[in-house]
Image (tube, rainbow, N blue to C red):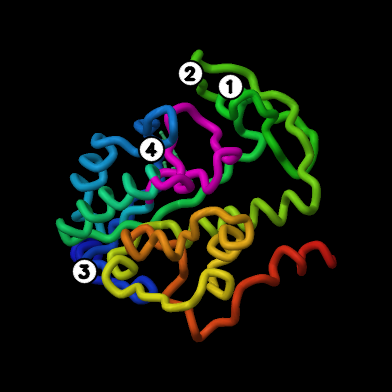
Amino acid sequence: MSQQLLTPVRIGRYIAPNRLVMAPMTRSRADGDGVPSDLTVAYYAQRASAGLIISEGVFPSAMGKGYVHTPGIETEAQVAAWKKVTEAVHARGGRIFMQLMHCGRVSHPSLLDGATPVAPSTIKPEGQTWTPAGQVDFVTPRELSLAEIADVIEDYRQATRAAPSTRASTAWSCMRPPATCPSSSSRRAATSGKTCTAARSKAAPALCWTRWMRWPQRPVPTASASRFRRR
Ligand SMILES: Cc1cc2nc3c(=O)[nH]c(=O)nc-3n(C[C@H](O)[C@H](O)[C@H](O)COP(=O)(O)O)c2cc1C
């Protein structure tokens, strides 16, 4: 039994040297802006000998935060900090997958700049969550509209693109103008006049949100939000 535990196993396109998988565990070591700290880097690096690490739950957008000092993967500072984590784990020969976790109603306004937590329906959960002021009761959430649900799906997509990858940092290149870029964030930025993430990523390719691995094999991803609305 122990011999098998320590033998390699294929997980998708990865080969783990052993079958020990670290479960996702919220550590609450990020700063108030959801940026992982140096302690986070040390924590995961120390565990790089696991066959696979699943990160703590990470909110894809600020409204998905549900516990004090949890990290996100939305802002540039958050992405840059996660890159330090993945680099430290990879440097020690480890593998780490990020758990994206939108906490929905399992949250509190004090974690959301005063906003009411969102959920599929207005049912208050039993229990409490941790806030800067300690443990407090959950509140009745606000029901998401269908369009907002599509936005949450889009948040997950963006977070997936933002998740740092050493392959993205070494192999990414994109010559498309932002308006035709497969990254919808780049297209949105281009049409709203903001800095295009694709253009910005030329200076810092590791932060690129374009799914370079899937382009040009896959069509431009525009459909899921509108598909959802048609249902
Ligand atoms: C402190 C703590 C934090 C946790 N955070 C997460 C989390 O962020 N995401 C998640 O899916 N599960 C989380 N869990 C659940 C664990 O990943 C695990 O599923 C749970 O502890 C049951 O595993 P066990 O049966 O081996 O004890 C957490 C558990 C603990 C004790």
Q: Is mark 1 on a helix, strand or loop?
A: helix
* Residue annotated with mark 2: 132
Check disc 3: other Cα within 10 Å, few if <14, some if 14-19, many if 20+.
Answer: few
Circle 4 is placed at which residue position?
Answer: 35
As drawn, the residue found furthest toward the left would be: 92
Q: Do labels 4 and 3 touch, CB within 8 Å?
A: no
Q: Which of 145 and 67 is in front in this view?
A: 145
Calculate the distance from the C-alpha at mark 1 to the C-alpha at mark 2: 8 Å
The kind of residue tagged 2 is: Pro
Tell which tag, 4 or 2, sits nearer the viewer. Answer: 4
**Residue drawn 28% across and 62% down?**
19
Q: Which of 127 and 219 is in front in this view?
A: 219
Residue corresponding to mark 3: 7
Disc 1 to disc 2: CB gap under 8 Å: yes
- Is ligand 1 closer than 8 angstroms to the Cβ of mark 2? no
Amino acid bearing label 3: Thr
Q: What residue type is labelled 1?
A: Ser
| Residue appearing at x 51%, y 21% in the figure | 131
What residue would you read off at disc 1? 110
Marks 3, 1: nearer the viewer: 1
